[in-house]
Amino acid sequence: MSSDSMFKYFIFCLALCSLVYADGEWVPKTSYEAYRIMQQCLSEHPFNKEQLAMIMQNFFFPNEPEVRQHLLCYYQMHGLFSTLEGFHPDRVAKIEKLDLNEEEVLQIAQGCVDRNEQKSPADEWVFRFHICLMSSKVGDRAKIINNIV
């Protein structure tokens, strides 16, 4: 991954998930902690060149096992999702809101949450949520911030 691509991905990750669950409370992640999470998830679930190009150039996340596993890792490590509890839209709303109102982000996140009635694997469940979130104003703002329009 080129340093420019890595930096853009890092900025996206910081913008999307800047908080973590700790000792029953949400605390802001430091840039270093968020970077370490991103590095760990990339190390465990790397993108191939084509996937990275789609994500970085078009903000398109392909529905492929590696991408889904990477997103699962990232959402879990930030405490936004657990296989036992599902999603925490209130936590999603508390992340950096990309210049959006927290209440608006909460409503968007709540609209993207499903209870996985079809009992799909966790990576597919997370992917559905992520695609919904990125198809909303949240994704539109992330694209603008990352100069992908």
Image (cartoon, rainbow, N blue to C red):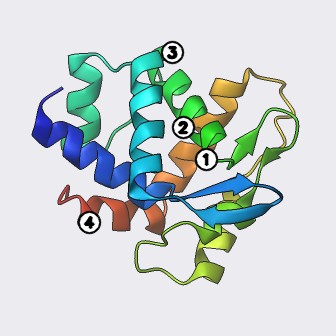
Please identify the quarter of the rendering in which residue 93 is found.
bottom right
Q: Secondary structure at mark 2?
A: helix
- 28 relative to 45, above or below: below
In the rendered structure, which disc, 4 or 1, sits on the residue that comes first in sequence?
1
Q: Is residue 83 left or right of residue 16?
A: right
The amino acid marked with disc number 4 is Ile
In the rendered structure, which disc, 2 or 4, sits on the residue that comes first in sequence?
2
The amino acid marked with disc number 1 is His
Q: Is residue 114 left or right of residue 132?
A: right
Dot 4: few (<14), some (14–19), or many (≥20) neighbours within 10 Å?
some
Label 2 to label 1: alpha-carbon separation:
6 Å
* Residue at image coords 65%, 38%: 76
* Residue at image coords 54%, 37%: 74
In the rendered structure, which disc, 1 or 3, sits on the residue that comes first in sequence?
3
- In percent of width and height, residue 32 lies at 39, 50
The amino acid marked with disc number 2 is Tyr
Q: Secondary structure at mark 1?
A: loop
Residue tagged 1: 78
Q: Secondary structure at mark 3?
A: helix
Residue tagged 4: 145
Asked whether the beta carbons under mark 2 and mark 1 sit within 8 Å of each other, the answer is yes
Residue tagged 2: 74
- In percent of width and height, residue 65 lies at 51, 15
* Residue at image coords 73%, 67%: 90
